[in-house]
Amino acid sequence: MDRSSRPDSVGASFVPVLVGITLVVSIISSLGAPLLPDVAADLKISLPSAQWSLTAALIAGALSAPVLGRLGDGRHRRRAMLGALVIVSAGGIVAGAAGSLPVLVAGRFMQGIGLGLAPIAMAAARDHLGADRARKTIAILSVSGATGLGAGYPISGLIAEQTNVHDAFYFGAVLSAVALVAAFFAIPSSRSGADASLDIKGAVLGGIGVVALMIAIGQGHEWGWVSPATLGCLVVAIGTLALWVRLQLRGTAPLVDLRQLRHRAVLGADVAALLLGVALYMFLTVITEFVQTPSAEGFGFGASTLVAGLCLVPFSICSLLGTRLMGLMVSRFGTRAALGTGGLAITAAGVFFALVHTAIWQTCVMMGLLGIGFGFTFAAIPGLITSAVPAGEIGSAMGFYQVVRSIGFSAGSALVASILASHEIAGSAFPAQSGYITALWVGAVASLVAAVVAVILAPGDTARSAGPTTPAEEELREIAREDAELASAGLIDAEVEAEVASSEFAETRGMRGRVRTR
């Protein structure tokens, strides 16, 4: 990739527009969990069925991230950004006008395409700004992702409460349309004249496999786990994903480099990322639906959509805090300690609310613990990966990690829908309390297993040694923090950041083999 040390001449609006795009995408990602009860009431469907409006967006994000990431690293970056924003804007209109679940799911899937825009914004900052300014801008973008989520939850809740849920989706369409116009005038073309290598067959096969698998997980209870429909989806998923794996292993420029799994630490990190992604969206769904359940059901707090959104704000705030504290823990005790602490915090959050859920303040305590836990784990895992693979493979390994984590988000959303559907009460629009408690325990077990796997497979000594650090080493640490902040918004970090920083790191340390975290 051709990157000059001299920055391009960009307008004064370039950085604000990049920040605005990241904010818009994170806000749109918040148009999910808090609105589920409103979606169910408006369309007269069950809460588990309404969950597909969230799952569809997460699936789209998982599928679009590697594709947009590749396109964004070539000369098609500007067109990829504009095209994605057009789809996101149109998706907001479709979702806002939806009068049935299939139409809403289609609109939300289109909106979810935007979840892959974060890496393009970061790549554009690095490509068009000087090194120092690029690092500062990327840090701002990562914080914007998390703060945008924190603001988006109550904003979308307020709109849905004061008007209706359709206006919340229209609000997302307006925001993305404004971002589209701003990007059209402010985003220059990439300086790279090379075409991005895009594995189209891999993208299509992977997409079919993931969608079929999520449908089987989400609809398994309603259709029956051994019904022809469920088994058919599983057969399609297994068959297409098997072909996809073979294609990725044999391809010269695969969409995802599966060969990175030969590294023990990378395998552990990816398994942990998958399970943590599952737990995250199970917990987010449980909290937002539980607090909005009318107390007449025998549980729940009958909270408004706005209050439900506010209950999620501690998660964003504490995840930012967790990413900062993680660096101190890694430097003193190593990556294993950070992963173990984070995993235990997440597990404790799920267990706490499964046992104690009689007051709304308890939801804030749970979300605060979740924020700390995910801030620790999502920020520590990239360091675990970079310490385990050769410098030239860090970009590919990080890209695979991002895809796996996003699939975990989707699987968590589909799984919680299936669990709640299995606890539906005849004549009631809300699942039984036992359904939420079951989901909490499943999420807690998933996060505990994730921590154990990551700790067992982590290198023996990843604590930071005393002494000064190089700029590239510091940049790798910044990438870890930025990744965790974006992850809290369900966004995807840029594998190109790890690739560039790792090459600089290897050069400054004179390494030809492996990159280790100092």
Image (cartoon, rainbow, N blue to C red):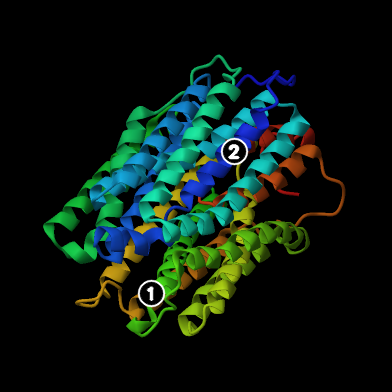
Q: Is 300 left or right of 181, judged from the image as shown? A: left
Residue 401 visible within the image: no
Residue found at x 31% / y 55%? 52
Q: Amino acid at mark 2?
A: Gly
Report how far apart the C-alphas of labels 1 and 2 lie in the structure.
34 Å
Q: Residue furthest front?
A: 162
Residue found at x 42% / y 76%? 302
Where does the image place residue 19, in percent across and percent down from the top left? 62, 38
Q: Is 320 left or right of 227, judged from the image as shown? A: right
Question: Label 2: which residue?
Answer: 20
Q: Residue furthest right?
A: 467
Residue found at x 67% / y 50%? 481
Where does the image place residue 386, in percent across and percent down from the top left? 63, 45
Question: Label 1: which residue?
Answer: 293
Question: Callout 1: helix, strand or loop?
Answer: loop
Quadrant in the rendering for residue 106: top left
Q: Residue furthest top?
A: 193
Residue found at x 45% / y 49%? 406
Point out the tag, 1 or 2, that comes first from the N-terminus.
2
Where does the image place residue 429, in percent across and percent down from the top left? 27, 71
Q: Mark 2 and mark 1 in contact (Cβ < 8 Å)?
A: no
Residue 81 visible within the image: yes
- The front one of 352 and 450 is 352
Q: Is 510 left or right of 276, judged from the image as shown? A: right
The vertical placement of 363 against 355, above or below, is above
The vertical placement of 108 against 501, above or below, is below
The vertical placement of 399 against 488, above or below, is above
Q: Amino acid at mark 1?
A: Thr
The vertical placement of 298 against 249, above or below, is below
